[in-house]
Image: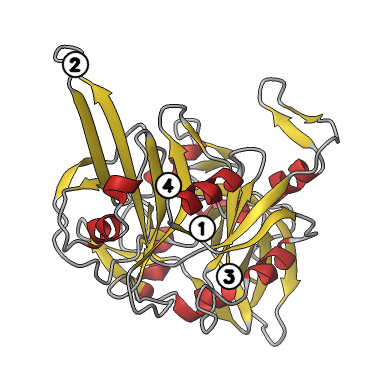
């Protein structure tokens, strides 16, 4: 799932910030964002840019973003870009950038109706906004690309809870959105949806897979073992961290044909090694059945890892009911200790036990400690 970094959203609530005369906090769906006092009224629409958006701060076509130039630390195509980060102002956490639609008269008519020539999903492209990708501190060794990430394996990228809190609550209330009827429908109350809740490990993601095909002309068996970074399949090299993990865990022999495992590599030389591990470790969070084109259930994923002697990401709850009443309760729940009990965890991942539905909750405490 790709993130929709720029959207039109509603101001759900406004609240004062103690000791602040010029700013206040706005609620935009599940996010809290500091805005100029008096700039919005409750119910107003705004152009909202999510955290981790890279915004063109010096592009002449978008003077509305020029005020970000003092924080622009990245360059691309001759322009400077600023990253929208999690920050704290007057002890108030602010995540994202909310701007009045009136700042974009060429795009929004009467501060509401958008120019039909630009579909809502293309707003990020229109503004040249891209996703900030944290640089790899080191992953060791060369990364010779063998090819694109295989099209028959889905990439993993859970949506943040702030963008789907109401959908999660609807699921708990046995309500789903019917896309054909375009209305909410009530489902039978025979089963409460539960989740596996695991610790989100802070490392670099890897996909390792094995396929076996038969050449129809020669009847020759073709066995392929692949190791992939987030976007590419990598050529074999034992000095590369991705392949180091695959070889260290003997996955060429262990992994069954027709399956892909997806996990996080953590340890020395990867990101900042926030877990403070002494050795390289692979933590599996997904197993994908390539032939059936589906992920194993959380329970089957854990059993799969146990059977071939791989370490699953740490699981805090196997059958957790989502009973939180508001976003803040979920965010507070995400705070806590990680795999290494001496460090704070990045957050939590919730995976439904009855469907492919999942989402992540990133700890604000972690973001403020580590978001550089």
Q: Are marks 3 and 2 in contact (CB under 8 Å)?
A: no
User: Which residue is the site of mark 4?
Assistant: 124
Q: Earlier along the polypeptide chain: callout 3 or callout 1?
A: 1
Foreground tag (3 vs 4)? 3
User: Which residue is the site of mark 1?
Assistant: 50
Element class at badge 3: loop
Q: Nearer the viewer, residue 97 or 105?
A: 97
Q: Are marks 1 and 2 in contact (CB under 8 Å)?
A: no
Q: CA distance from mark 3 to mark 4?
A: 25 Å
Q: Identify the residue at the far right of this view.
A: 189
User: Which residue is the site of mark 2?
Assistant: 219
Q: CA distance from mark 1 to mark 4?
A: 10 Å
- Relative height, residue 75 to residue 250 (above, below): below
Q: Earlier along the polypeptide chain: callout 3 or callout 2?
A: 2
Q: Is residue 255 visible?
A: yes
> Where does residue 178 sit, x and y in percent of width and height?
71, 26
Element class at badge 4: helix
Q: Earlier along the polypeptide chain: callout 1 or callout 4?
A: 1
> Where does residue 262 sit, x and y in percent of width and height?
41, 49
User: Which residue is the site of mark 3?
Assistant: 363
> Where does residue 156 sit, x and y in percent of width and height?
44, 47
Element class at badge 1: loop
């Amino acid at each position: 799932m790709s993130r929709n970094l720029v959207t039109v959203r509603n101001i759900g609530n406004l609240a004062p910030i103690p000791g602040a005369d010029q700013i206040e906090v706005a609620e935009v769906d599940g996010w809290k964002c500091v805005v100029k006092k008096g700039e919005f009224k409750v119910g107003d629409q705004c152009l909202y840019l999510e955290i981790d958006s890279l915004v063109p701060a010096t592009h002449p076509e978008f003077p509305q973003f020029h005020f970000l130039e003092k924080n622009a630390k990245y360059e691309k195509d001759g322009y400077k870009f600023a990253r929208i980060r999690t920050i704290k102002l007057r002890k108030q956490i602010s995540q994202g950038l909310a701007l009045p639609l009136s700042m974009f008269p060429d795009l929004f008519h009467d501060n509401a109706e958008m120019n039909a020539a630009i579909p809502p999903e293309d707003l990020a492209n229109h503004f040249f906004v891209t996703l900030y990708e944290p640089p790899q501190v080191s992953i060791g060794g060369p990364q010779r690309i063998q090819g694109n990430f295989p099209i028959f394996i889905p990439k993993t990228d859970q949506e943040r809870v702030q963008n789907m809190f109401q959908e999660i609550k609807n699921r708990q209330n046995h309500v789903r959105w019917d896309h054909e009827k375009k209305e909410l429908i009530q489902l039978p109350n025979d089963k409460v949806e539960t989740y596996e809740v695991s610790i989100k490990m802070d490392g670099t993601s890897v996909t390792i897979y094995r396929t076996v095909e038969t050449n129809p002309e020669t009847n020759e068996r073709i066995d392929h073992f692949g190791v992939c970074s987030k976007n590419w399949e990598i050529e074999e090299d034992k000095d590369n961290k991705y392949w180091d993990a695959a070889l260290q865990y003997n996955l060429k022999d262990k992994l069954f044909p027709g399956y892909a495992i997806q996990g996080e590599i953590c340890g020395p030389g990867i990101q900042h090694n926030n877990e403070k591990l002494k050795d390289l470790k692979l933590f599996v969070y997904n197993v994908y059945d390539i032939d059936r084109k589906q992920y194993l259930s959380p329970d089957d994923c854990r059993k799969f890892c146990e059977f071939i002697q791989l370490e699953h990401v740490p699981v805090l709850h196997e059958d957790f009911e989502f009973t939180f009443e508001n976003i803040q309760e979920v965010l507070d729940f995400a705070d806590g200790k990680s795999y290494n009990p001496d460090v704070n965890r990045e957050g939590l991942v919730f995976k439904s036990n009855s469907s492919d539905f999942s989402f992540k909750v990133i700890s604000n405490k972690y973001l403020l400690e580590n978001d550089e």
